[in-house]
Image (spheres, rainbow, N blue to C red):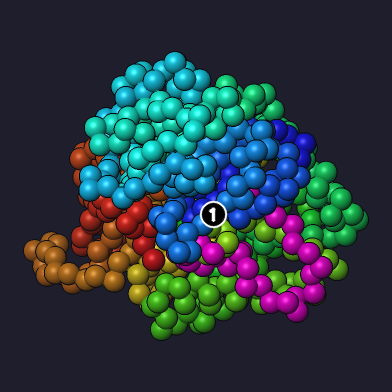
Amino acid sequence: MQNQTILVLDFGGQYKELIARRVRECNVYSVIKPGSLTAAQIQSLSPIGIIFTGGPSSVYEKDAPVCDPAVFSLGIPILGICYGLQLMCHTLGGTVESGNLREYGKIDTQLDVSSPLFQNLPPQTKTLMSHTDHVEKLPSGFVSIAHSANCKNAAIANTEKALYGLQFHPEVETTDNGTEIIKNFVYNICGAKGDFTMADYIQQQISAIRAQVGTDKVLLGLSGGVDSSVCAALLEKAIPDQVVCIFVDHGCMRKNEGDEIEAVFSKKRLKFIRVNAEDRFLSKLRGVSDPEQKRKIIGREFVALFEEEARKHGDCKFLAQGTIYPDVIESGANNSATIKSHHNVGGLPEDMGFIGLVEPLRGLFKDEVRRLGRQLKLSKVLVDRQPFPGPGLAIRIVGEITREKLNVLREADAIVREEISRSRAKAHQYFAVLTNTRSVGVMGDGRTYDYTVAVRAVVTSDFMTCTYAHLPYPLLDRISSRIVNEVPHINRVVYDITGKPPATIEWE
């Protein structure tokens, strides 16, 4: 590893990706590895620090995740979070107990600000707690550096050995000054220099792409979304004139989107091909209502078209994909639960003829991808484009997909995006969903029986979690009025106020 690295050891925590992302926000590179790594394996990675994630287990459960005890003798600073704290204490001779007083949610917490972990922080803060077990007795050499009303060891430290633990979660936005705590750990305790930047990442990936591909051609499926567009721009910079970009227009794009994509990429040093396949996709989707089945059908057809176009447009030895880290997580990689499948993660047929995958964005979060695109001077219309799933509007139509429904949704969605963008309301992603609910309405003194459109707008920094955007009522009123007046077959507009979790950002 060329950059200083913080190693995130995963013990089943749902927030492991956020931990890695928060470290990177501090301009320090991070990688996630299984908590079962041996001390020797950890040493081979040469991390400047280690963070233990949380997890759903109790340290006393039969199959609870464990770490190599030798990791604590490596001389590498360690920060344990939630289960990571309890595992550290349990392994080093402390006592973990299950208490009657559990802590869930934002809790008032007192910090010892003399600790380098809490430097320049207020002594009283609110932290996100989510635990039943707690550390009752500290291992030798440890002291408490934070407490709450029901948790006397909300944070602990062995300063001499640079071992620290937090019962709360600093990686989530609900913990006040959580990123500052992580920053204090990586800089004050681990001695980070902050040597990870997007410019640095670009040069690393250019070298890696050139080393992997050589003089061979690369085939990229270009959706026009942020991920595939940035991937195309990076490939063009690394291996100009060796990239074949196939834009499969499956007929489920947003209004005018296909023409915008063609206008940008037809001028670059790569071969751009647009395949108009609306009829083909709609015929395959006829009668299909299940969202996961829609994804799989579109994914299969996408791959099939790839095979056909690869034969037409030269000998492409490598397949490039705009896979990003949340795609990998939500598709169930590394024993995570499958939230929804992504056609660009796994499942590709073995007989496609490619000798390797090029995935230069696989370790990045969405906001990092956008920063990378800006660094590459990619068109603002693409870098700032609203996130859009690979299957497009197909999964924003609840129930069966028809050409009529697609046309209705395109117009409604265009209104939503136009109005929210123009208002400058705080929302990071926003779109319309055509539900399969039909209801009675009154328009022009006549009875209607038409569809309901749901408006979705969320606030998020990582796209792994979100809250709904608190859009002003006059804005919602304008959106509703325009949709029912300008878009046929819509007589009702509703606003989704559900966060993630328990919902997903999309509706399928």
Q: In this view, does 501 lie above or below 188?
A: below
Examine the rendering and report whether any part of residue 97 can be seen.
Answer: yes
Classify 170 as above or below 229: above
Measured as percent of width and height from the top left, residue 270 is found at: 78, 52
Q: In which quarter of the image is residue 342?
A: bottom right
Q: Position of residue 398 (x, y in %)?
A: 35, 70
Q: Which residue is drawn at 79% across and 56% down?
A: 243
Res 233 visible:
no
Check the picture and name the quadrant holding the C terminus: bottom left
Q: Residue at x 21, y 62 (%)?
A: 491
Tag 1: amino acid: Val
Identify the residue at image location x=35%, y=54%: 501
* Label 1 secondary element: loop
Q: Where is residue 399 in the image (x, y as percent from the top left)?
A: 35, 74
Residue 185 lies left or right of residue 247; in this view the side is left
Farthest left residue in view: 445
Q: Is residue 355 magenta?
A: yes
Q: Could you tell me which residue is drawn at 14 percent across and 65 percent down? A: 441
Where is residue 161 shown, x and y percent of the image? 59, 29
Q: How many marks do you count on the picture? A: 1
Q: Overall secondary structure of the magenta stretch? A: loop
Apparent side of residue 426 relative to residue 343 in the rendered image (left or right): left
Q: What stretch is highlighted in magenta?
A: 335-363
Relative to the observer, which residue lies in front, 59 or 447? 59
**Is 435 contained in the magenta span?**
no
Q: In which quarter of the image is the N terminus?
A: top right
The residue carrying pointer 1 sits among few (fewer than 14), some (14 to 19) or many (20 or more) residues within 10 Å by Cα, namely some
**Residue bearing mark 1:** 66
